[in-house]
Amino acid sequence: MTDDTRHSAFRDAHTDISTAREVPDTPQTRAPSYRLAFADDDFLCRDELRPVRLQLELLKPQLALDEAEIDSTIVLFGGARIPAPENKGAAKTETLGKLSAFYTEARRFAQMMTERSNATGGREHVIATGGGPGVMEAGNRGAIDAGGHSIGLNIVLPHEQAPNEYVTPGLCFNFHYFAIRKMHFLMRAEAVCVFPGGFGTLDEMFEALTLIQTGRMKRVPFLLFGRSFWEGIINWEALAEAGTIARDDLALFRFVETAEEAMDAIDNWEGKGEKRGEIPGR
């Protein structure tokens, strides 16, 4: 519920923040202890307040997405360093330049899915990315191509970073905690699409796979774009042969190469919505 629609008999918190700025300047009112707790940055950033900050970071995007009436998302994970085709000549390595093809596929896939989303009034199948450059930019850009909106879940990093220009401004969020950010990626996800990437992409991919594998998250279409890339960096068969994962775990995901293959895989995914170990129909 927004401030504009809320009805309460109690005095509004914004009003008290404004009023507190006008109090007489005295030694007492200058003391940090006199600041309103919810308007005191130093207080909110204390180590003891970490549980409150975690809760706030979970709640703020949740309320905003609820108010935007977004019911389901299509999550795109992928590398921030993968260039758009028009910029592949500036790529730091030849391989990165070749991977620009996945920027194109991410953009095309996001456009196709957003066209489907538009038919629901933008409530379902909404593209959600990390809000940064590379594959993330491609996803948000594809949503713009289709005349729709998209979500960007950015995070504060030690080096300078800003959201890409294609994220819908009112659906662009900034995080301090990686864990809460990853929760928001998956809370509304009806499909997860993973493009080539680095440590961050691998982290996001394996956490989501683990949640599905352990039954903590329902099965959703889980697509890895670029078989040769993924089989080149991860020996999936060796994991199954060693017994460190079950052979059935290899069915939790599927390789695709193009946007069209991804759309078809999502539409024809078996076991969608089930949890591992569930008996179908129960």
Image (cartoon, rainbow, N blue to C red):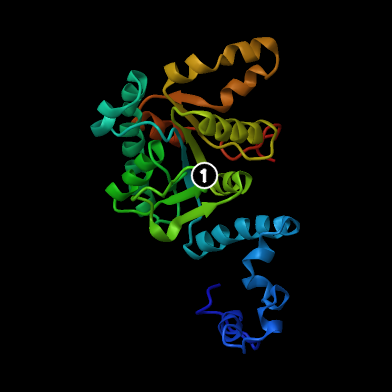
Image position, residue 39 (x, y; %)? 62, 72
Q: Is residue 118 left or right of residue 189?
A: left
Q: Residue at x 73, y 55 (%)?
A: 47
Look at the picture and state if 196 lies above or below 171.
above
Look at the picture and state if 5 lies above or below 199.
below
Residue that sits furthest to the right in the current view = 48
Q: Which residue is mark 1?
A: 157
Viewer-proximal residue, 121 or 128?
A: 128
Image position, residue 214 (x, y; %)? 70, 33
For the C terminus, the quadrant is top right
Look at the picture and state if 230 lies above or below 198.
above
Q: Residue at x 61, y 80 (%)?
A: 13
Q: Residue at x 45, y 55 (%)?
A: 172
Q: Is residue 145 left or right of residue 158?
A: left
* Residue 100 visible here: yes
Circle 1 SS class: loop
Q: Amino acid at mark 1?
A: Leu
* Residue 121 visible here: no
For the N terminus, the quadrant is bottom right
Mark 1: few, some, or many residues within 10 Å (few <14, many ≥20)? Answer: few
Image position, residue 210 (x, y; %)? 65, 32
Q: Residue at x 48, y 30 (%)?
A: 223
Q: Quadrant of residue 59?
A: bottom right
Look at the picture and state if 268 lies above or below 13.
above
Image position, residue 206 (x, y; %)? 60, 30
Q: Is residue 48 left or right of residue 65?
A: right
